[in-house]
């Protein structure tokens, strides 16, 4: 991959025009339109596949820097394709971007949980694509989080999410920022048991979880543990404004969308930890 050569040789930081992209789009017309958008951003290394299996075959020969896929392919969905990639150690950290006219929350949620750099609508605007490509660069070549009051190597974080894929994705982002001491819990109830015996500097939690959701976990921390100061970052794809307001009222320090941008996460973590 280009970015590996870049790091080893100490060349300039990876730029958008350096990205090697695999575009998976069954429609020849749509593929050309997206290709033109990418070329408008300066990207020249673009390979095109029209089915999921064709893409997998191509990736077995050459691993791109970014995969951009439509939701519905002739032989599988983007959810199926992404699940296959995440199960393969060679591809499980490969940046993945979805471009789709799909708006149903229940269809998009598995993609969000699996960890994607962006979900773009069809049609999308140039600045949306540029932001998504910039996010990809941040994911490929992350910068460490710089804090005055904490040593990031010793920062103790509790990561709570019922999705193993989501935990792995968030864990990787935290690790890339220099945060090494991360303890994982599959839901709020498990997190509660862990917090009875361990202290943490930060809690990063999902909202929608079985047994005990993120809002209930936040209330437990604020009331049962009587800890009004522990920073809590809620990572959620929730769009309901009433529920988001209830989350904030429960006492979270910040709310971050899924999929999230590493730079945005850095800013939120800085605000949570340095206030």
Image (spheres, grey):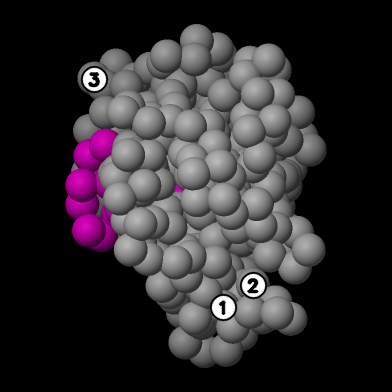
- The magenta segment is 83-97
Give the main secondary structure of the magenta stretch. loop
Q: Is residue 254 left or right of residue 183?
A: right
Q: Which residue is mark 3?
A: 75
Q: Is residue 4 left or right of residue 268?
A: left
Who's the residue at 76% across and 28% down the image?
125
Q: Position of residue 249 (x, y in %)?
A: 70, 30
Q: Secondary structure at mark 2?
A: loop
Relative vertical location of residue 51 with respect to residue 228 in this rendering, above or below: above
Q: Residue furthest bottom?
A: 9
Q: Secondary structure at mark 3?
A: loop
Sequence-earlier tag: 2 or 3: 3
Closest to the observer, 22 or 230: 230
Disc 1 to disc 2, C-alpha distance: 7 Å
Q: Position of residue 110 (x, y in %)?
A: 37, 27
Q: Position of residue 201 (x, y in %)?
A: 54, 66
In the rendered image, which quarter contains the C terminus? bottom right
Relative vertical location of residue 54 with respect to residue 107 in this rendering, above or below: below
Closest to the observer, 240 or 192: 192
Magenta segment includes 127: no
Q: Which residue is mark 2?
A: 145
Disc 2 to disc 3, C-alpha distance: 41 Å
Q: Position of residue 87 (x, y in %)?
A: 20, 47
Who's the residue at 21% across and 52% down the image?
88
Task: Say which quarter of the image contains residue 241.
Answer: top right
């Amino acid at each position: 991959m280009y970015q590996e050569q870049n790091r080893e040789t100490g060349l300039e930081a990876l730029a958008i025009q350096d990205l090697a992209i695999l575009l998976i789009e069954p429609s020849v017309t749509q593929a050309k339109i997206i290709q033109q958008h990418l070329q408008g951003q300066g990207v020249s290394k673009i390979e095109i596949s029209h089915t999921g299996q064709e893409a997998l075959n191509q990736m077995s020969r050459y691993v791109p820097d970014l995969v951009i896929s439509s939701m519905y392919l002739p032989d599988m969905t983007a959810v199926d394709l992404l699940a296959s990639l995440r199960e393969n150690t060679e591809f499980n950290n490969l940046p993945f971007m979805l471009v789709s006219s799909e708006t149903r929350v229940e269809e998009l949620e598995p993609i969000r949980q699996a960890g994607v750099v962006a979900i773009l609508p069809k049609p999308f605007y140039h600045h949306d694509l540029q932001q998504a490509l910039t996010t990809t660069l941040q994911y490929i070549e992350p910068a460490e989080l710089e804090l005055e009051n904490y040593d990031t190597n010793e920062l103790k974080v509790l990561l709570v999410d019922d999705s193993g894929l989501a935990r792995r994705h968030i864990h990787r982002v935290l690790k890339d920022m220099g945060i090494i001491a991360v303890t994982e819990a599959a839901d709020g109830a498990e997190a509660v048991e862990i917090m009875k015996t361990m202290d943490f500097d930060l809690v990063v939690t999902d909202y929608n979880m079985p047994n005990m959701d993120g809002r209930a976990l936040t209330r437990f921390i604020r009331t049962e543990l009587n800890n009004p100061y522990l920073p809590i970052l809620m990572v959620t794809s929730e769009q309901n404004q009433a529920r988001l307001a209830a989350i904030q009222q429960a006492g979270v320090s910040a709310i971050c969308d899924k999929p999230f941008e590493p730079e945005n996460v850095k800013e939120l973590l800085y605000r949570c930890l340095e206030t």
